[in-house]
Each structure stands twice: as C-alpha cells, then as structure tokens.
Image (cartoon, rainbow, N blue to C red):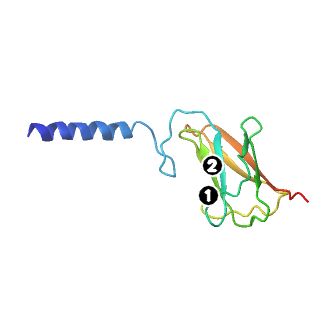
Amino acid sequence: MKKYSILILLVAVCLQSCYDYPIDEDGLLITDRAECYVSNFELLGTDYQTVRTKNAVIDTLAQTIDVEVRWGTDLKKLWPQFSLVTDAKLEPKITGWTDFSNLNSPKQWTVISGNRQVRKVYTVKIAVQQLNP
C-alpha cells in the first residue's frame, strides 16, 4: 500500500509540473524564453535527400537564410526544415511541399519565441548552382 501512495504522489507532482506553463493553440507550452532564431536550415527534394550544394547561410541579425541548390532541382516541390531555438515555433506551419520556383519572390516564415512575445520574420532566398562551361 505504501508503494502505491508514493507512486500516486509522484504522478501528482509530475502532473502539477506540467501545468506550470500555459498551453497555446497548437498544444505547445508557452514558456519564459524570449529567444527567437533559426539555428539550422535544410531543404529536401522529392526523394527526401538534401538538394543543397553547401550549408545554408543563416543571418540571425538580418533574419535571412541563403541556400544554393543543385542544378536541375525541381524548385516547385521542396520540403524546408527549420531548427529553432528551444520552445520557439514557426508560422506558417510546414505541412507539405513548398514551391520555391519564383526566385524573385523569396518565401518568408515567422519564428515566434517560447513566451510568444517576440516574432521575427525570416526570408529564405534560393539560388540555383551555376554550371561551369
């Protein structure tokens, strides 16, 4: 009986700690963190392999991501993947393939801090690898 009492107490403590922070409309915890940035960026093709020729250049001050893709990449069907600082979230959500074919109109996503107070718009600029003659 004593084991069950301890187990119930542990479960109650765990449940209480989950309720220390409110939850947003996506079911994510709203925390005290004000950090708001992209730490890594990946771009996948239809075979779910990277289409980058080198690492993306992420400028957290200018809030830009510059990425070069291989010659011949189908720009109409790419899957961007963002790594964000802890507790941040991305808007709009990425739910499928993204069309990057209009190189003159870069795509934008907003990174929202864990406390939901800081919002930073990141612009993703795509360049296609040049073939050397």
133 shown above or below 87: below
Look at mark 1 in the image and give the residue it sits on: 94
Q: Left or right: where does residue 18 sit relative to residue 123? A: left
- Report if the CB atoms under discs 1 and 2 are less than 8 Å apart: yes
Q: Left or right: where does residue 29 sit relative to residue 11? A: right
Q: Residue furthest left?
A: 1
The crowd level at tag 2 (other Cα within 10 Å; few <14, some 14-19, many 20+) is some
- Tell me how far mark 1 sits from mark 2, CA to CA: 9 Å
At x 21%, y 37%, the residue is 9
Q: Percent x, y for residue 117? A: 61, 37
At x 76%, y 61%, the residue is 100
At x 79%, y 64%, the residue is 101
At x 46%, y 41%, the residue is 22
The image quadrant that residue 64 belongs to is: top right
Q: Percent x, y for residue 84? A: 60, 43
Look at mark 2 in the image and give the residue it sits on: 82
Q: Quadrant of the N terminus?
A: top left
